[in-house]
Image (tube, rainbow, N blue to C red):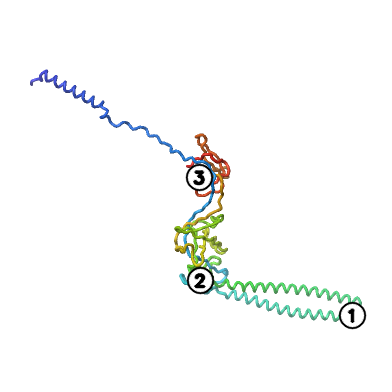
């Protein structure tokens, strides 16, 4: 095999050297450099807002939600010692004011009333007879004494008359007390008669009836029949109790652009007992205040519509206040005692420092500062 010439070998070496030199130049060129290594990204703390403590007005407003429903009242039998005799209405039925809805069996009540009346009639006959006998005896004493001359015998007769009169007075007082007791019993039974009948207190629609039948005993103080009045609209809170509004000066319902004045409806004792026995906390309820024949703005709230309830309280004017987000609360427990401390973060020469405070009234946006901060100091708003 013929070996390459010396000139050819030199040309190959020369080309290799040139190729290697060009690669070195390309790798050193700035345009050909690869992407630089990523720099370390460090988190940057977003500075909290800093606002001054200012003087202003605090107007507390509580906001909750309710639903529009017809006014309804739970009707019940206060006399739960007798079975149901008759139910005259059904669910959804329209009734008029005073209409009889249901009644209990009054036979046992009538039996007790007749017995008390019979006792009183018997006592009246006994009193009349004994009074007649006593009057005759007293007259006999007086006639006998009139016939006697002044003597020891007459003195004894006078003492006997006085003793008789004393005993007779006690008898009359005792019998009079017994007569009053029986009469009071009769009056009480007669007053109970209405408790055996349920009548509609207003015109409306039967909303619901306890599922009881003739012969069953009603649930006593628990509502037995619910009667709705579609002409009276009420607002039932979905979550809040009546105490939520106890400090409010004005409460309004907001529907669209209209504000409707409403008045709280307090539950009757029977209604409160029903909630208690069922283990339910009664929600607050209100009635829309009508203006003449309609509602404010001429609009009638729609049944089952959810609305906002705004409770306005008496505010505070010209007091130190800070935003609600500037105040914080710290709680601690020691030996079973829970302590609560309010505080704010204050900017002191660029340094964030904690400061304990005492707050007063508050609204949705501001809190009154009673102690701990001065006007013009800077606080952090988180």
First in residue order: circle 1 vs circle 3? 1
Q: Earlier in the sequence, mark 2 or mark 1?
A: 1
Per the rendering, the mark at residue 203 is: 2
Give the quarter of the image for residue 37: top left
Query: Disc 2 versus disc 3: distance between alpha carbons?
Result: 52 Å
Mark 1 nearby-residue class (10 Å; few <14, some 14–19, many ≥20): few
Closer to us: 357 or 191:
357
* Depth check, front residue: 82 or 331: 331
Dot 3: element: strand
Classify residue 347 as left or right of residue 116. left
Q: Position of residue 356 (x, y in %)?
A: 55, 40
Residue 247 rendering spot, x and y as whole percentages: 56, 54
Q: Residue 369's image quarter?
A: top right
> Mark 2, residues whose alpha carbon is within 10 Å: few (<14), some, or many (≥20)?
some
Q: Is residue 147 left or right of residue 289?
A: right
- The location of residue 336, given as percent across then percent down, is 57, 45
- The residue where tag 1 is placed is 148
Residue 331: percent from left, percent from top: 54, 43
For the residues carrying marks 2 and 1, which lies nearer the camera in this image?
2
**Residue at x 70% of width, y 78% of height:** 124
The residue indicated by pointer 3 is: 323
For mark 1, give the secondary structure: loop
């Amino acid at each position: 095999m013929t070996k390459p010439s010396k000139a050819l070998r030199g040309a190959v070496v020369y080309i290799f050297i040139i190729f290697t030199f060009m690669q070195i130049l390309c790798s050193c060129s700035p345009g050909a450099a690869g992407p630089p290594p990523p720099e370390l990204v460090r988190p940057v703390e977003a500075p909290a807002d800093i606002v001054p403590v200012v003087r202003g007005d605090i107007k507390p407003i509580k906001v909750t939600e309710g639903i529009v429903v017809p006014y309804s009242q739970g009707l019940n039998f206060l006399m739960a010692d007798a079975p149901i005799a008759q139910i005259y209405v059904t669910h959804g039925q329209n009734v008029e004011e005073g209409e009889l809805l249901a009644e209990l069996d009054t036979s046992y009540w009538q039996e007790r009333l007749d017995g008390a009346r019979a006792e009183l009639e018997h006592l009246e006959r006994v009193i009349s007879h004994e009074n007649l006998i006593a009057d005759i005896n007293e007259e006999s004493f007086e006639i006998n004494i009139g016939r006697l001359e002044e003597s020891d015998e007459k003195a004894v007769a006078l003492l006997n008359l006085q003793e008789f009169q004393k005993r007779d007075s006690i008898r009359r007082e005792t019998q009079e007390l017994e007569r009053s007791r029986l009469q009071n019993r009769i009056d009480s039974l007669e007053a109970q008669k209405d408790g055996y009948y349920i009548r509609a207190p207003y015109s409306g629609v039967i909303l619901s009836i306890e599922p009881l039948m003739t012969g069953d005993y009603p649930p006593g103080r628990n509502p037995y029949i619910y009667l709705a009045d579609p002409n009276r609209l009420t607002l039932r809170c979905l979550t809040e109790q009546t105490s939520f509004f106890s400090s409010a000066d004005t409460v309004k319902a907001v529907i669209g652009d209209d504000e409707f004045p409403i008045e709280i409806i307090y539950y009757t004792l029977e209604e409160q007992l029903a909630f208690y026995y069922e283990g339910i906390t009664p929600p607050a309820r209100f009635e829309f205040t009508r203006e003449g024949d309609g509602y404010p703005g001429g609009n009638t709230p729609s049944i089952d519509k959810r609305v906002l309830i705004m409770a306005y309280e008496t505010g505070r004017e010209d007091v130190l206040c800070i935003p609600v987000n500037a105040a914080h609360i710290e709680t601690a427990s020691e030996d079973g005692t829970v302590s609560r401390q309010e505080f704010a973060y204050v900017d002191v020469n660029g340094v964030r420092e904690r400061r304990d405070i005492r707050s007063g009234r508050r609204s949705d946006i501001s809190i009154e500062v009673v102690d701990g901060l001065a006007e013009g100091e800077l606080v952090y708003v988180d």
